[in-house]
Amino acid sequence: MSGDSLPQAARLRSPKIDFDHHSQEFRDGWREIYDQNLTQCPVAWTDSHDGFWVFSGYEPVSTALRDSATYSSYHDSSGGGAGIPPTTDQAMIPLELDPPASLAYRKLLNLTLSPQASKARKPYIQDLVTECLDQVCESGQMDVLHDLTGPVTATLTLAIVGMPASQGRRCAQLMHDMTTIFPGSPEYNEIAQDFGKLLGEIAALVPERRAEPRDDLISHLATATIDGRALSIEEVANVCALVIAGGVETTASLVAHALRWLSEHPEERQRLINDPDLIPSAGEEFLRVFAPVAGMARTATTRTEIAGAMLEAGDRVFLMYGAANLDPAAFDEPAEVRLDRFPNRHVTFGVGSHRCVGAHLARAQIEIILRSVLARMPDFVITEAEPYPDLGMGNGFATMKATFTPTAGSPAQR
């Protein structure tokens, strides 16, 4: 049997590591594993999940993100795509397409998620945060994820998409469950069916919004064209589903990480209380250190060499955002959280043609939630924080409990 006909995982790959981002070992020691990979093997092969390359170094990760011709995001029936293993059978649009096809969809999304549009939504975000905090402030305790960050991010995202705000908590729980459970398990498949129902609800609204458009993403996509062709109902639902999948649990997890760190570093928390204008910079640093997405996968399209490793066409590649953000070759003392770090060229939102279109909206939510919690609950303490059982999809928490001095509700509530 020739080398070209060997199964992918059976070919010689060097250097090789024992790595599985879905493992208990990674869940319990991701920081140490990042550091080890960065020091010993910024590009390495693992036999896990039928074999793939692990890019940990900042330079190889950034190079691959910028080179969509060599490192493809494309997902079809034969595999590929953003997940290892794949999370769905159907390609997520535009995440699992390559330029120029992906750029046409991104152009449509940019109109809805632009910096200007995100800034205009700040009052609504503040209202959502205030409402959530009003519901818990007198009790002196809350579940950060289920009482605050999840409902805020989910309700906002659904409003942008064009779904009822009343579905926010349902959506928050659904996205939380999808992120915490290993893809392909019976539990995940059951949750995926529930997500399919949500897609069906979106699809059912497309004809209505085509006839009577509103100021929402469903209407925008339903009345848009690409190369003179109207988007199908399935395309509209798929794009909206990606916005929901990318916009809810990720931001919720990041804020949870930030609040936990501030609880453990009260002197830095007081620094932000005294100087709230530092919060945007602090948000960027939390994004760097606690990247809520472990990474994204690509597929090599041609034989290529990078960081001393030789990749073959068809090899799968996992780009470890979290590790790249901690690379000492790119960041001075990367393990240290510096609330005023500048410059801060983290890759949490990606780089290149697939850079997260919701980055501006995420930043707005992070800033407003942190400002509000620090202003209304300045002495909060995180008393319990249970990480996801599986960090392969994202780095977050299954639950996070907080206590604080009870206060009266907002003036509107009183």
Image (cartoon, rainbow, N blue to C red):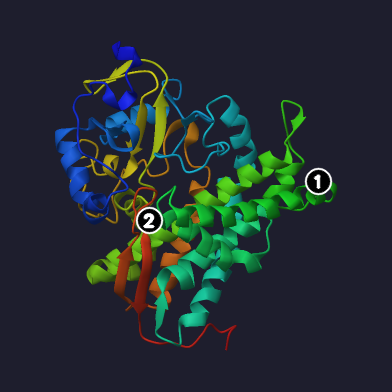
Is the Cβ of the residue at disc 1 closer than 8 Å to that at disc 2?
no
Q: Residue at x 28, y 39 (%)?
A: 324
Q: Position of residue 301 (x, y in %)?
A: 42, 19
Up/down of 377 relative to 35, above or below: below
Q: Quadrant of the C terminus?
A: bottom right
Residue 332 seen by the camera: no
Residue 19 seen by the camera: yes
SS category of the residue bearing label 1: helix
Q: Residue at x 45, y 71 (%)?
A: 372
SS category of the residue bearing label 2: helix
Gap between marks 1 and 2 measured at Cα: 38 Å
> In the picture provided, is 375 more to the left or to the right than 107?
left
Please state which amino acid type lies under the numbered disc 1: Arg
Please state which amino acid type lies under the numbered disc 2: Gly
Report the residue marked by disc 2: 283
Q: Nearer the viewer, residue 235 or 371?
A: 235
Counting residues from the start of the chain, the first of labels 1 and 2 encountered is: 1
Which corner quadrant of the image does residue 4 belong to? top left
Q: Position of residue 181 (x, y in %)?
A: 41, 55
> In the picture provided, is 346 more to the left or to the right than 366?
left
Q: Residue at x 33, y 70 (%)?
A: 274
Pair 1/2: label in front: 1
Which corner quadrant of the image does residue 139 belong to? bottom left
Which corner quadrant of the image does residue 383 belong to? bottom left
Which of the labelled discs sits on residue 210, or is there none?
A: 1
Q: Residue at x 63, y 65 (%)?
A: 167
User: For mark 2, does the 10 Å Cα neighbourhood hold few (<14), some (14 to 19), or many (20 or more) residues?
Assistant: many
